[in-house]
Image (tube, rainbow, N blue to C red):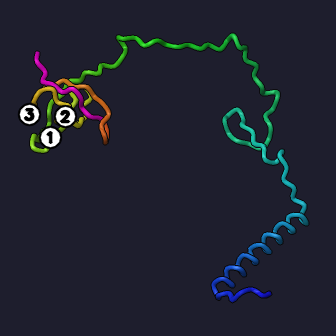
Amino acid sequence: MGRSQETFGKKEVRKKKDKKRKDKEQKRAKKKVEGKKTNFDDMIAYVDEFGMITSTPPDPDKKIDVEVDSIELKITKNNPQSSPDFVRKGVVSTFNKSKGYGFIRDLSSNQSVFVHVNSLLESIKENDVVIFEIGKGAKGPAAMKVKLFKE
C-alpha cells in the first residue's frame, strides 16, 4: 500500500527531516574520514597559579607545600558592642495621612526610608523627630515600630 494522500505541507516537513538526517550522516562520515578523535584528555582544563584556565598541566616545580598546622581557622563571636544599632533616629520628610504612607530621612545615614501607617505606634506628621527600626519592605527598606522621639 502506498501512503495515504499527503498534503503539500506534510511532504515538505518529511523532505526537511530526510535532508537533515542525510546532512547529519554526511558530517559523521566526514569526521570519521578526517580522523579527528576527541578523547577525555583533550577536554581537560587546568587552572594556573594566577587563576587563569589553560590547556597545559601545572608545573610540578612551582608547587608549594603548605603545612596543615600553619593554617589558622578562626570563628569570631558576636560582640554586642560592635553590633549595629537597629533603632534609628530620623525626621519625617513627608507623610500623607489620607494615603497612609510617607518617608523618613535617617539622620545617621541620610537615607530615605519608606513608612506605612500600619507600622506606626503613634501618629506622626511632617518634620517630627522619630525613632524606628529598619526592616525589609516590599520594594526595599521600610521603617517599622515608628514612634515619636522624646528627649
* Amino acid type indicated by mark 3: Lys
**Vertically, is 123 above or below 81?**
below
Majority secondary structure of magenta residues:
strand
Identify which residue is drawn at 36% across, 11% down.
Answer: 80
User: In the structure shown, which secondary structural element does the residue marked by tag 1 occupy?
Assistant: loop
User: In the structure shown, which secondary structural element does the residue marked by tag 2 occupy?
Assistant: helix
According to the picture, the residue beneath numbered tag 3 turns out to be: 125
Question: Would residue 67 be found to the left or right of residue 83 on screen?
Answer: right
* Amino acid type indicated by mark 2: Asn
According to the picture, the residue beneath numbered tag 1 turns out to be: 100
Mark 1 and mark 2 lie on one chain; the one further toward the N terminus is 1
* Amino acid type indicated by mark 1: Gly
Question: Would residue 52 be found to the left or right of residue 122 on screen?
Answer: right
Residue 44 image offset from top left, x and y in percent: 78, 43
How far apart, in angstroms, are the residues tagged by discs 2 and 3? 15 Å
Q: Given contact means CB atoms under 8 Å apart, are the residues at marks 1 and 2 in contact?
A: yes
According to the picture, the residue beneath numbered tag 2 turns out to be: 118
Identify which residue is drawn at 37% across, 14% down.
Answer: 82
Q: In which quarter of the image is residue 59?
A: top right
Neighbour tally class for label 1: few under 14, some 14-19, many 20 plus, Cα within 10 Å: few
Residue 71 image offset from top left, x and y in percent: 65, 14
User: What is the span of residues highlighted in magenta in the rendered image?
Assistant: 141-151
Q: In which quarter of the image is residue 95?
A: top left
